Every structure is written in C-alpha cells, then in structure tokens.
Image (tube, rainbow, N blue to C red):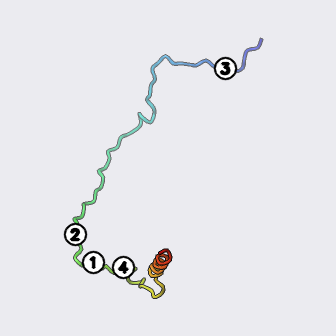
Amino acid sequence: MRQAIRPDQAVLQSQEPFDDRTGYRTDYIRHPQQERFQRAKEEYTPNKTALDSLTTHKKDFTPKEGSNLNQIYIYLIILIFFYFS
C-alpha cells in the first residue's frame, strides 16, 4: 500500500517555556519626551466701553406696515365668543 502524501496533522508542542522576546522589544530605544508647551494664561480684563445693544435685526429689519396677525386673532376670538353666547 502507498503512503499518504499529506503530512501528519498531529500538534507539535515545544518542551521549552514560551519566550516572548521579539526584535521590536530588544531593538527599541526609549527616547526622553519633551515637556508639553503651555501658554501662559492671560488675566481677564473687562471691556472699558459700554455695550452697544444695537443688533443687525434691530437695525436692518424694521417693523413693516400691513396686517397685524394678532389683531386678526383677537377679532376671531371675539366673533367666536359672541357666536357661542
């Protein structure tokens, strides 16, 4: 009978303890780290001028003439009140 061409699938186990030394661990050179740069904190100084409360909305979007929706709603509420009473 012929011998099998496929190799034996038995697990090979070493009798020596596991050695975790790798090339990276042995060749690594630890360089000193530089200190982190920290900017000096500026002291708070309040604004010397008064706050101008004019916003772009107040300046550019002025009230327009036309129908006021609040007046229409009040009118409808009055009509409904008189209709149901």
- In terms of sequence position, does the residue under pointer 2 or pointer 3 come before the other? 3
- In terms of sequence position, does the residue under pointer 3 or pointer 1 come before the other? 3
Is the residue marked by circle 1 packed among few (<14), some (14-19), or many (20+) residues within 10 Å?
few
What residue appears at the point 24 percent right and 64 percent down from the top-left corner? 42
- In terms of sequence position, does the residue under pointer 2 or pointer 1 come before the other? 2
Separation of residues labelled 4 and 1 (CA atoms): 11 Å
Residue denoted by label 3: 7
- Looking at the image, which is closer to me, 66 or 6? 66
Which dot, 2 or 1, sits closer to the camera?
Answer: 1
Separation of residues labelled 2 and 1 (CA atoms): 15 Å
Q: Amino acid at mark 1?
A: Leu
Per the rendering, the mark at residue 51 is 1
Residue denoted by label 2: 45
Which dot, 2 or 3, sits closer to the camera?
Answer: 2
Q: Quarter of the image holding residue 25?
A: top left
Q: Amino acid at mark 2?
A: Thr
- In terms of sequence position, does the residue under pointer 4 or pointer 3 come before the other? 3
What element does badge 2 sit on? loop
Which dot, 4 or 3, sits closer to the camera?
Answer: 4
- Labels 3 and 1 touching (C-beta < 8 A): no
Which dot, 4 or 2, sits closer to the camera?
Answer: 4
Residue denoted by label 4: 55
